Amino acid sequence: MKLKLNLEDKILKLQRCIEKIKENREVLIIIVMFILLCFIVCLSEVLYTSHFLLGTSPTSFNWRKALFLIIPIIFFGILVISIILRFLRERKKAEEVLQKSQQEFVSLFKNSPEALVYLDEKGNIIDINPRFTELFGYNLNEVKGRNLDNGMIHPPEKMEEGKWMTEKALKGKFYYETIRKKKDGTLFPVSISISRVMLDGKLQGAIGMYRDITERKQDEQLHQVLYNISKAANSAISLDQLYPLIHQELGSIIDTTNFYIALVDEKEDKIFFPYNIDNTKPIHLPRTINHNSLVAEVIRTGNSIFVNQEIIKGKKFMEKFKEWFGTLRKVWLGVPLKIEDKTIGVIAVQSYTNSHLYSERDIGLLEFVSSQVATAIERKRTEEKIRYLSFHDALTDLYNRAYFEEELERYNFPRYYPLSIMMVDVNGLKVINDTFGHHKGDKLLQRLASLLNSISRKGDVIARLGGDEFAILLPSTTAEQVHDFHERIKKTCEEDSIKPIYLRPSIALGHATQKGEYQNTEALLKEADKRMYQDKNITR
């Protein structure tokens, strides 16, 4: 059994050796040449041997010379034949490799996931792949032989750009991002990379690759919008300045012709509209959170709502909103503004002309940016609240001493002369606090603040300086005018019909006027304060 296996191994080795010799014909030819030479040498010896052994006379023909003359002829002949055979075999192999390479190229070209176009050295189209047809809408018969830059895939304003790109691309590798046009006229962003096709050092043409980068551009634009909103939220602009900026930024990713922001007022339990741009309904009145409207529904549920005329009529749960939706609206889309899990408002877009202006995709788009919008709005609201509290009295909602003193310095300028100051002091506040409690004393102070606000002018600065002391700054007010104002305040307080009667403010007033020459504000305050105490002594 072992002997049989060894024999089979030897046979297999011999077969492999023979196969290798067949594969390498030059080796086979050399072996044959070697055997032939050996045969010739042997033959020459045999021819001479007969002369010596048999005693025959040597012939006149010299066989040895003739045979040895044949040897180099055969050698060189075999060598030439082997070189020719090797050349032919290598050429055939190169042709097979080239054919295989061409087939692979065609396969890669046709099956590429990117849109490819094959151009000659003049920019004329030789071939396109299926993806090019899918992307641009043209088949090969429509474009073959046409110049790429004849406006077929170029918007009018990009014609010169296309020619410049082709010229540059035929000189070397090239990459560019721009706008191109489909067969149906649709414009879309593309990235273009072009590589030259060289053969034996000569330019044969170029292959252009087109990639639709619409989604990438949308993502870039979306992140730019988020960045711009975040940047605005961290800038020094006010909340009222932030709203139009949000509108402008969102307008770059979605149609915001009719756009509004609704926010929740938790104290009043109402929805108000701090920003509204609407061609048909320029004013949105505040409403309760239980109002029968889609904006209130978004706030109540915390979920986005997309609805058009078909949906409003076709879905049962939308029936209660039919009256609110009306017949003018064609489509409405609203998404909640959330801080963590708390809904603080809604951003909404709508159209009165096109029911297909928005789609389900736009819900995700607005939801993606809504958290950044909510964060920006909440940040500005917090900043303004802090700023408000830093300059306002928490009890009466009037300005505080710090703000009043700052404004007094600002107004103490000839432009605002005559500048008048009114000092106000509440009589009997301590008695009310001691008798009825501090919460009633607080009510009295709040009532006086309300009365002062009701009779003051828009440009007047009313402040609670502390305790029972108030002050009013009146720019561009003469001594006579401030005296009239003094009397009006007195009369308003005396005729106040509030119940219980002890909440009717009893006050002492004093005023002073800066008439024309610069006067130290401290001296102005002292003069008004002095007159206020004089009035207080009289009212006692």
Image (cartoon, rainbow, N blue to C red):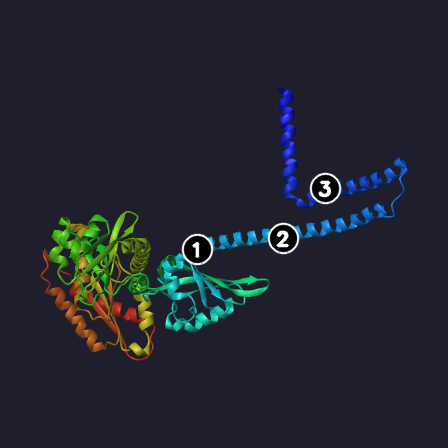
Report whether 9 appears left or right of 440.
Answer: right
Could you say whether the residue bearing mark 1 is in a helix, strand or loop? Answer: helix
Relative to residue 187, is residue 345 depicted above or below?
above
Could you say whether the residue bearing mark 2 is in a helix, strand or loop? Answer: helix
Residue 113 placement (x, y as % from top left)? 42, 54
Report whether 63 appears left or right of 354.
Answer: right
Q: Nearer the viewer, residue 404 or 114?
A: 114
Amino acid carrying label 3: it is Ile
**In the image, which disc is placed on residue 110?**
1
- Badges 2 and 3: C-beta atoms under 8 Å apart? no
Could you say whether the residue bearing mark 3 is in a helix, strand or loop? Answer: helix
The residue pinned by badge 2 equals 88
**Residue positioned most to the front:** 56
**In the image, which disc is placed on residue 31?**
3
Q: Say whether residue 224 is visible.
A: no
Considering only order in the chain, which callout, 2 or 1, is on the residue closer to the N terminus?
2
Considering only order in the chain, which callout, 1 or 3, is on the residue closer to the N terminus?
3
Within 10 Å of disc 2 (Cα), the crowding (few <14, some 14-19, many 20+) is few
Q: CA distance from mark 3 to mark 1?
A: 49 Å
Q: Nearer the viewer, residue 487 or 346?
A: 346
Report whether 470 appears left or right of 123.
Answer: left
Q: Residue at x 69, y 46 (%)?
A: 26
- Badges 1 and 2: C-beta atoms under 8 Å apart? no
Q: Quarter of the image for the C terminus: give it.
A: bottom left
Amino acid carrying label 1: it is Lys
How many numbered tags mark residues here?
3
Amino acid carrying label 2: it is Leu
Q: Quarter of the image for the N terminus: give it.
A: top right
